[in-house]
Image: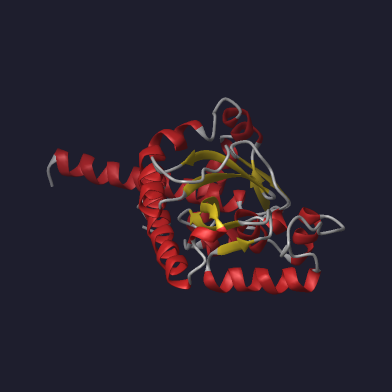
Amino acid sequence: MTDNDSRSKSTISANRSVARAISVLRALAGNSEAATASDIAKKVGLPRATTFRLLLTLEEEGFVDRRDNRYSLGWDLARVARSADPSAGMVARVRDSVHKLAEQLGETVTLSLRQSLFELDVVLQESPRSIAVTVSDMRGMRWPLHASATGKLLLAELSPEQVFRATGEELPKLAARTITGREQLRAELDMVRRQGWAHIDDELEDGIFSMSVPLRDNVGQMFAAVAMVAPRHRIEADDIRQRNLQILLDGAAQLTHQLTSTMPANA
């Protein structure tokens, strides 16, 4: 083996370790409570011993905190993260792709970034060059989670107790078909989990239709969502909705590829 071969193998091994450590951090970020090494190992698809060694190193660096053999994201990771704008890098990398997606659909497309367990914020909105009816700028706006397509995606990631905490005591009626009953919402979220996407139809505002698809990292956590928003009258036909859904699913796959590592957690 040459020196170059040795250095190349060493570099590949180091890169794998970095990718695995990032996967561990992502898995911890997706938990609402501290997790054991076994929990994290199962989530990232690594042996427990490997996961434990990664957690130990991350703990030494302050990127992970440990209490009674349960781990959570660390204090120094939070300090470092405060200097970063989580949306700036994302928007720069995918703006052109989101605009092309809007052109394909002929409708407005939004990209929302998951900021916390209960929050998705619109960070990018693109519309085709020429449409008869435009959608107002939604960046920075918030809606009740039960009445928006991206909100339903987020709620579908949560436990029943967390859904109640996220939505509050009441589910206010905002439009003709807004979901206002807990059982109806539970059934809707079950459907979202099964099919992998969400939609609203006269639920947030009369005359507005939207569908949304999640973007997931390499440990399966939803970190963002891409959505199409349109006047209902333009996409009432089932064949148009199915066509647009497939375009949105393909677009979400491309955006995920652009924004995440292609190296699997257990590589």
Q: Is residue 261 visible?
A: no
Q: In this view, does 61 lie to the left or right of 22?
A: right
239 or 198, nearer to the observer: 239
Residue at the far top in the pictured view = 83
- Residue at position x 54%, y 28% from top? 84
Residue 95 in which image quadrant: top left
Q: Is residue 239 above or below residue 78?
A: below
- Residue at position x 35%, y 44% from top? 15
Residue 152 in which image quadrant: bottom right
Rendered location of residue 266, percent (x, y): 41, 59
Q: Is residue 214 visible?
A: yes
Q: In this view, does 61 lie to the left or right of 13?
A: right
Rendered location of residue 191, percent (x, y): 61, 73
46 or 160, nearer to the observer: 160
Residue 6 in which image quadrant: top left
Residue at the far front in the pictured view = 132
- Residue at position x 63%, y 33% from top? 78
Rendered location of residue 115, percent (x, y): 62, 42
- Residue at position x 45%, y 64% from top? 245
Q: Is residue 132 left or right of residue 194?
A: left
114 or 145, nearer to the observer: 145
Residue at the far right in the pictured view = 169
Colour pattern of the rendering:
secondary structure
Q: Is residue 77 above or below residue 83?
A: below
68 or 174, nearer to the observer: 174
